[in-house]
Amino acid sequence: MIPFLGAFGLFAHRKHLYLWIFNLQIMKKALKEIKLGYGLGNLKFGMTRKEVELMLGKPSFIDKYSHSDSKKDLTESWQYDELLLSLSFDEEEDWKLIMISVNDEFYELEGKSLIGVFQ
């Protein structure tokens, strides 16, 4: 009976992995298009951190920093490793999304990838 439970656990784990990969693929497709002045797919500039977290889940890494000596000039950067995506929220903008950075040729502007283009 123990091998059966072990096999079931492995099956359940694989099923969870397949669902995670499937959800990641759906999420990436929803974010594929770079929209100048708007955002990336359904992700739009001006969204709150909570709205972004509801859409994308918890980030892989969060970094908080300041561009000056002032503690009132904070920026929070969220990294999503699986999506090759980085987002920045600014304290002066009430922690709204102010910057989106992509690092994968998957993302496109007007149907064309800009990653690796030198012109």
Image: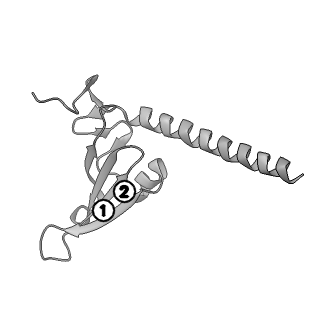
At a point 35% along the width and 52% down the height, the residue shown is 47
In the rendered image, the vertical position of residue 18 relative to residue 73, given as above or below? above
Query: Disc number at residue 95?
Result: 1
Q: Which of marks 2 and 1 is nearer the N terminus?
A: 2
Give the color scheme: rainbow, by chain, secondary structure or one colour. one colour
Residue 106 image-quadrant placement? top left
Disc 1 marks which amino acid? Trp
Count residues near mark 1 (Cα–Cα under 10 Å), then give few for <14, some for 14-19, many for 20+.
some
Residue 112 percent coordinates (x, y): 25, 23
- Percent x, y of residue 32: 36, 32
14 and 111: which is toward the camera: 14
Q: Residue 99 location, x and y as percent? A: 24, 50
Q: Are marks 2 and 1 in contact (CB under 8 Å)?
A: yes
| Residue at the left extreme, as displayed | 119
Q: Nearer the viewer, residue 43 or 29?
A: 29
Image quadrant where residue 110 sits:
top left
Quadrant of residue 28 within the rendered picture: top left
* Residue position for label 2: 48
Is the residue 109 above or below the residue 55 in the image? above
Secondary structure state at the residue bearing disc 1? loop
User: 20 or 109: nearer the eye?
Assistant: 20
Say what amino acid the circle numbered 2 marks. Thr
Task: Determine the secondary structure under disc 2.
Answer: loop
- For this rendering, which residue is in front, 118 or 55? 118
Please name the residue shown 44% across and 55% down the image. Answer: 53
Q: Residue at x 21, y 65 (%)?
A: 92
Mark 2 to mark 1 CA distance (whole Å): 6 Å
